[in-house]
Image (cartoon, rainbow, N blue to C red):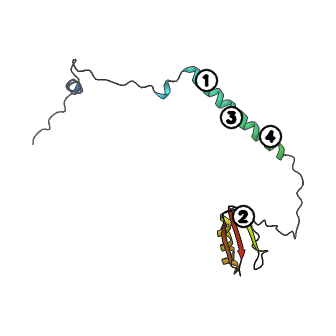
Amino acid sequence: MSKMPKAPNKEKILHVHETKPEEKKFVRKTKKKDDKSQARKQYEEQRRGKALAKAQDKIVRKYEELDEPEPILIETDVQVQRRYNYPFKDMNVGDSFFTKNYRAQSAAHTYGFNNGKKFSSQYDYEKEGWRIWRIL
C-alpha cells in the first residue's frame, strides 16, 4: 500500500501564485451599486414612500365610492344592439360603398364567404381608398 502524498499547505500555494514585485497588474476599480451616497438613498426612499401613499390614496377613494352603490335595475327581453363597421348585411346586389380602410376588402370577402354572398373590391387611385360592390 502506497500512501497518498499530502496536499501542500495553503501558505505554500499562495506563495507560489504570488506575482513578482516587478510585475504590476492593472486592476480596474469599479463602483458597486451598493456604494450610493446616503443622500441618494434617502431621496429614493422618500420617493417610493410618496408613490406608495399616492397609490393607496387612489385605492381608498375608489372603495369609498363603492361603499354607496346605487340600486341596479334588472331588465328582461332587451335585444343586444351590435355595431357593425361596414354595411354588408344591408347591401343588395349592385350596391357599393367607399372606404379608406384597406381591411374592408378582406372583411367583405370574409363576410361573403360566411353568409353565401359575393363582393368585389377595387382600389380608387384618385380618392385613395377602396370601393366595394356586392355582386351576388
Task: Specify the label residue 32 is tagged with.
Answer: none
Q: Quadrant of residue 1?
A: top left
Q: Could you tell which of marks 2 and 4 lies nearer the N-terminus? A: 4
Q: Position of residue 3 (x, y in %)?
A: 12, 38
What amino acid is at disc 2?
A: Thr
Q: Could you tell which of marks 4 and 3 lies nearer the N-terminus? A: 3
Q: Could you tell which of marks 2 and 3 lies nearer the N-terminus? A: 3
For mark 3, give the secondary structure. Answer: helix
Q: Which residue is mark 3?
A: 52
Q: Quadrant of residue 84?
A: bottom right
* Nearer to the camera, 38 or 9: 38
Q: Residue at x 62, y 27 (%)?
A: 45
Q: Position of residue 67 (x, y in %)?
A: 84, 46
Label 2 or label 4, whichever lies nearer to me, is 2
Q: Is residue 28 left or right of residue 40?
A: left
Q: Position of residue 72 (x, y in %)?
A: 88, 57
